[in-house]
């Protein structure tokens, strides 16, 4: 009896381990690379295979965005090895993108946009996608392959720090168009 009690935990743990191993191998999905194609720090929020917008590439120039000599010296002096992109305030950042809308995106599509400075939420808003597309000389309806180019001048007044941006895009019927996130260091 004592021998049985001594071996019982061993048998149960072996059985549990084999069950979780077999069940886990059948139910787990392979890892998906969430990096957005192109030369950029963007990532998809989740597996993009079901998104309406298939992104061919998003290129930022320069990428990593301009690293100032003083910032590099400060990082070397402080011993920080942070790989986060440092965007130079007061400089231009060019964005080039190409993608394919597999369904037509009509008026009333929207973007849920969130911008955080560290842990502090600066922006949390819902914006009209078609109004925002005017910034890149595009109009709704959006369908098929589209190319966009935009140059953004970053103001010198941006406080230095780490910013996290999340853009979640939906059709007027609440179907996911895409979802992108990035972290940028100013």
Image (cartoon, rainbow, N blue to C red):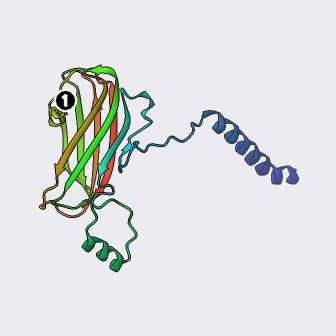
Image x and y of residue 59, in percent: 33, 46
The quadrant in which the C terminus is found is: bottom left
Residue corresponding to mark 1: 138
Image x and y of residue 178, in percent: 34, 33
**What residue is at 29 percent from the left and 57 percent from the top?**
65
**What residue is at 50 percent from the left and 40 percent from the top?**
32
**What residue is at 38 percent from the left and 66 percent from the top?**
82
In this rendering, the answer to whether 182 lies above or below 76 is above
In this rendering, the answer to whether 82 lies above or below 151 is below
Q: Nearer the viewer, residue 33 or 134?
A: 134
The quadrant where residue 150 appears: top left
Image x and y of residue 125, in percent: 18, 39
Q: Nearer the viewer, residue 123 or 132?
A: 132
Q: Residues within 10 Å of mark 1 (few under 14, many from 20)?
A: some
Image x and y of residue 138, in percent: 19, 29
Q: Is residue 31 left or right of residue 135?
A: right
Q: Is residue 165 left or right of residue 79?
A: left
Disc 1 is placed on an element classified as loop
The quadrant where residue 109 appears: top left
């Amino acid at each position: 009896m004592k021998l049985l009690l001594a071996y019982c935990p061993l048998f149960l743990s072996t059985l549990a381990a084999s069950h979780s191993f077999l069940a886990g191998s059948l139910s787990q999905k392979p890892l998906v690379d969430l990096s957005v194609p192109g030369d950029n720090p963007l990532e998809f929020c989740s597996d993009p295979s079901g998104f309406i917008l298939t992104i061919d590439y998003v290129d930022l120039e320069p990428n990593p965005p301009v690293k100032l000599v003083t910032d590099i010296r400060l990082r070397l002096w402080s011993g920080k090895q942070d790989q986060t992109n440092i965007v130079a305030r007061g400089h231009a950042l060019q964005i080039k993108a190409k993608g394919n809308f597999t369904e037509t995106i009509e008026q009333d599509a929207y973007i849920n946009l969130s911008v955080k400075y560290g842990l502090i939420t600066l922006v949390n808003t819902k914006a009209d996608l078609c109004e925002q597309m005017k910034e890149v000389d595009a109009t709704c309806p959006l369908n098929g392959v589209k190319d966009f180019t935009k140059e953004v001048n970053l103001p010198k007044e941006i406080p230095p720090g780490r910013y996290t941006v999340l853009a979640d895009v939906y059709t007027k019927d609440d179907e996911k168009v895409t979802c992108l996130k990035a972290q940028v260091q100013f």
